[in-house]
Image: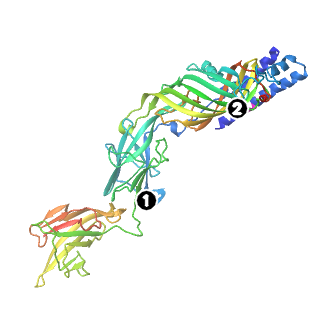
Amino acid sequence: MNLMKLIKRGLWSLIPLSIFLATPSCRDCDAYSNPSSYAVGAFYDKNDYSTVLDQDFEFVNGIGGSEITKMGNGKYLLPLKVTARETGFSFVMPGMADTTYISYETSVEVNGPDCGAYEQITNLKVSPTEGGVGQDTYVGEFGALFDSVTIAWPTVIADTITENIRFVIDVCNSEDKSASKNLIVTYFDLVTGNPREEVFSSIFVKGKEFEDPIYDGSDRFSTIYLPLEGSDSTTFVFRRQSGEGVNTDQELKVVFNTATTISDDETGCIFFDGVGDVLLDSAGTTGKEFNYPAGPHFKKMQIDRTTVNTNPNIPNVKLFI
Amino acid sequence: MLSYLSKILTITLCLLGGTLTLYAQNEAGEVASDSSEYAQDTTGIIKEPWPLNKNGEPKGSQFLVLSGMRLGTDMRPLVQSMAESNMSAYTLYADLMIRNDFFITGEYGRMDRTVENPDADFFRYRSNGSFYRFGVEYNVMKRSSIDNALSFGFKYANSTFDQSADYYSSGNGYWDEGATLKHLTEKNVNVDWYEITVSIKVVLIKNLTADFGFAYVIKKDFPATAITKAHIPGWYHNKDDRSRINFQYRLLYRIPFWPIYTEPRIKKKQ
């Protein structure tokens, strides 16, 4: 073999190596290349996962931190502590609140000289309790605001679209059920503190004494349901009539709002238009307890539950006789 | 992916071009009465008869005729080590030629590579460790040439390395955590993978062989690590893919043992 052919052969065989080495191996900086320590949380109706639940919270914050505002897309950026491995968040609705603890790990994402290396938060888990075992999904207790909390994407990346955590709320179907508007009132014996049965000639909403009363004197009850009227207050009148036809009345005035989040006692589903913040009103003063030493029927009135619901064992108002 | 395809296409064209040129040179050599070129390709071939031992039987066992051994190194890490100031890598390769059919291969290598951005202090990654791979190749040109070969193979590879990174931690302003530079080291990261190879072996000069081709590497066990395994000895640049195509270019020197026969071995005398 002459020298020229040897050189040619050698050069030909070197071409593949030179091409391979000359071809740059590049990687564009992508979402993973941008560091973020904010998980994206979104809320969904258990009965409709198609759209993000656009329900305003009264307050959302990292436990110990300031308020977190909702983004334009209805989701929340939840700031994770980089110096810890768990961060708790509090979600407050008018009348209800829930907390979730997000646990995580960190890894170092190495991209290259152009995109650098960044700390990335991965392996997100959720727990309803601080220091609890992190899970991909946990189911809330009966009556809790969150029916379940699920990890949708376990790695935190720098965008506001990809949801990391889905908070699922079992919103009550308004076609099947509506929030209770019946105030639960129970009579108690002032001395013994036990429930007692009573009968009144009539119980009616103030100003409607000439219409059908809510109750008349036919039966004795210890617990009665009084339908609230109006949007912020209702006054009920408890009347006894003496043998001479003299009426003795005592009023019970309650104030409330009708935009409270409550969990239905029977099903556990959530109403956003429930009645809550129930308080007593006595001569323009609101409070949870008032004493009436000279009261014709009741010596003391007391608020026991501030949200109106269906369980008769938890009255809203206790009336002590 | 696109860069892979372009690499494969380009290299395939070059390989085809190179191979065709070599054959064209051989053919031209015959016609142009280049006797030295002709002799180069055929002197090693012993067609008939097989050498016999003193009992009148063919030498060597039926199958395990150790025809030779090749020793060499992969040029790619050496060239890269010369080109990059922060890289030091080499491999040692050996194979046993079972007749001209099978090549039992083994390879050991080391790599120490640091990747950094010289203009910024937020990135510095170092991978330092070793690897080995072994397997078998089958030569589909076993009867047409004793010097050149086209082989397909299957191999297993294992790499153990340490890696460290200087990286940027963004912190979180909500919690009054500022951005910081951090450092993390991981020791004894172990990964392994399989390789399906195709390679062309071309004799440059007597017994000195260029061995170049592709290895389709498939991850077997890549455990999760705190640092992205960006550079792995033996696997080289690692992306998120489950598999990739590696290229190798080895220079080998063959130490002949038994003669290589391209004709079928005659049967034992009865």
Instruction: Reply above or below: B268 against A6.
Output: below
The location of residue A278, given as percent across then percent down, is 25, 63
Instruction: Reply above or below: A310 against B147.
Output: below
The location of residue A214, given as percent across then percent down, is 25, 77
Look at discs 1 and 2 and give the one toward the viewer: 2
Which quadrant holds residue B29? top right
Instruction: Reply above or below: B106 against A97.
Output: above
- The chain holding disc 1 is A
Which quadrant holds residue A4? top right
Query: On the image, numbered disc 1 is attached to which residue?
Result: A46
Q: Main secondary structure of the magenta part?
A: helix
Q: Amino acid at mark 2?
A: Tyr
Label 1 to label 2: alpha-carbon separation: 60 Å
**Is residue B110 in view from this perspective?**
yes
The location of residue B205, given as percent across then percent down, is 76, 17
Same chain under badges 1 and 2? The reply is: no
Question: Which stretch is magenta?
Answer: B9-13
| Extreme residue toward the top, this view | A3
Which quadrant holds residue B241? top right
Residue appearing at x 54%, y 31% in the figure? B230
Query: On the image, numbered disc 2 is attached to which residue?
Result: B138
- The chain holding disc 2 is B
Q: Where does the C terminus of chain B fall, quadrant-wise?
A: top right
